[in-house]
Image: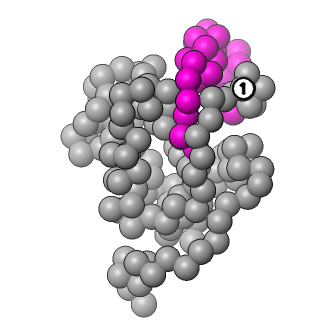
Amino acid sequence: METTYIMIKPDGVQRGLVGEIIGRFEQKGLKLVGLKSMVPSEEIAAKHYEVHKERPFFPGLMKFITSGPVVCMAWSGVEAIKVARTLIGPTNGRDAAPGTIRGDFGMDIGYNMIHGSDAAETAEFELGLWFPEGTMNWNYETQNWVYEG
């Protein structure tokens, strides 16, 4: 099993897509092991997006991500990072296939509603940053009907 970090950004929250987005991960068969809502501080946002700090879009990104509530989630499952990234779709909603979150709801590269870890190392860092208290471990009965054996 693998755990990934997913964040519904302020635009996704403001557009009322939280339930729809969570539903897609649940319907796929991933297990929700962490969930909270917050308005990110400048400090946590800067740490999260540190890889972009020298890019020209960084100030706007910081203003956007701290502009309102986000929904922080940890999802677990077999190849959870790959599965989540497939559900999310490419960064630019105009390039994303129908059926993906960004393909169904996104029209912009900046307002793209959702973030998902892109690798195991990134997921470990992001989960530690947004869930310093750790995530839950619980018995997911449905899992017996998601994975063979």
Quadrant of the frame with the C terminus: bottom left
Which element is circle 1 on?
loop
Position of residue 110 measured from the top left corner of the image (x, y, whole percent): 45, 20
Q: How is the image coloured?
A: one colour
Where residue 73 sits in the image (x, y, percent)? 56, 49
Residue 55 forms part of the magenta stretch: yes
- Residue at image x 53%, y 46%? 6
In the image, residue 59 sits, relative to residue 31, either above or below, namely above
Residue at 39 percent of width and 67 percent of height: 29
Q: Which residue is painted at 50% across and 31% down in the image?
A: 9
The range drawn in magenta is 48-72
Coordinates of residue 75 in the picture (x, y in percent): 53, 58
* Image x and y of residue 78, in percent: 49, 69
Is residue 61 at least partly visible in the picture?
no
Q: Is residue 76 left or right of residue 52?
A: left
Q: Which residue is mark 1?
A: 41
Taking the spot 78% from the left edge, 26% from the top edge, the residue there is 43
Q: Nearer the viewer, residue 83 or 13?
A: 13
Tell me: 36 left or right of 15.
right
Amino acid beneath label 1: Ser
In screen coordinates, is 77 left or right of 120? left
